[in-house]
Amino acid sequence: MDSEEISDHPITPEWPVPFGVIPDEHDIPSLLELALATAAEAAGLAAAERAVAVSRISTKSTVNDVVTAADKAAEELIVARLSAARPGDSFIGEEGGSRGEARDGVRWIVDPIDGTVNYVYGMPYYAVSLAAEARGRLLVGVVRNIATGTVYHASAGAGAFRDGLPVRCNEPAELGRSMLATGFGYDPDQRARQGALLAGVIPHVRDIRRTGSAALDLCMVADGTVDAYYESGPNVWDYAAGGIIAAEAGAVVGGLWGDVPGRSMILAAAPAIAGPLRGLLQSRKADTAYRSVTR
């Protein structure tokens, strides 16, 4: 099947889903300023502690799903700084789980080091990922590459930026001339299904890249380094900050069936190829590539 033959499914709704208006009590510029400062401090800690941290590694869902002392220390720093500045907020993080109850307030979504395996091996694709949401609506997102210092940020309705300069996603002519990014989970059976899915995708695109950081993959959609990204299995802390950055850069961000992103699938793509890519992934039953490994 040629890429031109793939059906163009409608891309609705857009994501983040606007559950009503943003409450007036949330000062988005102040949230962004706090997120930028906190991400910078956490990145500094992770960079400074890397030599020691990589010698103190434990595992989570599988033997390949690693966590370092720096992951835990960086998340504790983030929670401490945000709690001091905004004591009523709640958190969900990769290492610490859920803390507090947001109700109608702000919830921070934290990945202290997205791309921990890269961090361990010294590959320069690992980042602090920090987002704030309220009532189901993402307000701000910051992704800071710890290795390079590159900073991406976005806030609702205000666009996306890389190192302070505005960015926009690419406008590829067709899926067959597009560069895609993707990722893989840690469970061997899940990886096998993701590999089979990739084998069905790659004949229809220009090429594939895999960095090992969902947050940075989404930022690369935002700045045009790649044209699209898809993955089954990531958690909300992997994609929240990068998702609002990609969306504010003009990308279509959502799930496989036009819904919001989730564990079964997140897709971010330039508008011209979002429909064909979603159709291709649907035809390959992409949402079956994920299953929970927490039994």
Image (cartoon, grey):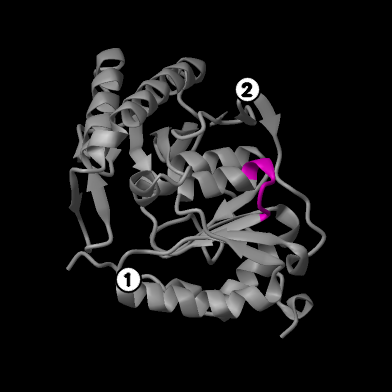
Most extreme residue toward the bottom is: 1
Res 35 → quadrant? top left
Magenta span: 222-227
In this view, 253 is above or below 194: above
Dominant secondary structure, magenta: loop
Asked whether 193 falls inside the magenta stretch, the response is: no
- Count residues near mark 2 (Cα–Cα under 10 Å), then give few for <14, some for 14-19, many for 20+: few
> Where is residue 85 shown, x and y percent of the image?
30, 13
Q: Which residue is mark 2?
A: 164
> Where is residue 111 shown, x and y percent of the image?
34, 40
Res 164 → quadrant? top right
> For the residues marked 2 and 1, what is the alpha-carbon distance in whole angstroms?
38 Å
> Where is residue 28 shown, x and y percent of the image?
49, 20
Q: Is residue 106 visible?
A: no
Q: Nearer the viewer, mark 2 or mark 1?
A: 2
Residue at 28% in and 18% down: 81
Q: Which secondary structure lies at badge 2?
A: loop
- Work out which quarter of the rendered image holds the C terminus and state it: bottom left
Residue at 24% in and 38% down: 53
Asked whether 291 or 188 is in front, the reply is 188
Q: Which residue is mark 1?
A: 291
| Type of amino acid under label 2 | Gly
| Type of amino acid under label 1 | Arg
Asked whether 225 falls inside the magenta stretch, the response is: yes
Res 193 → quadrant? bottom left
In this view, 230 is above or below 108: below
Residue at 45% in and 54% down: 212
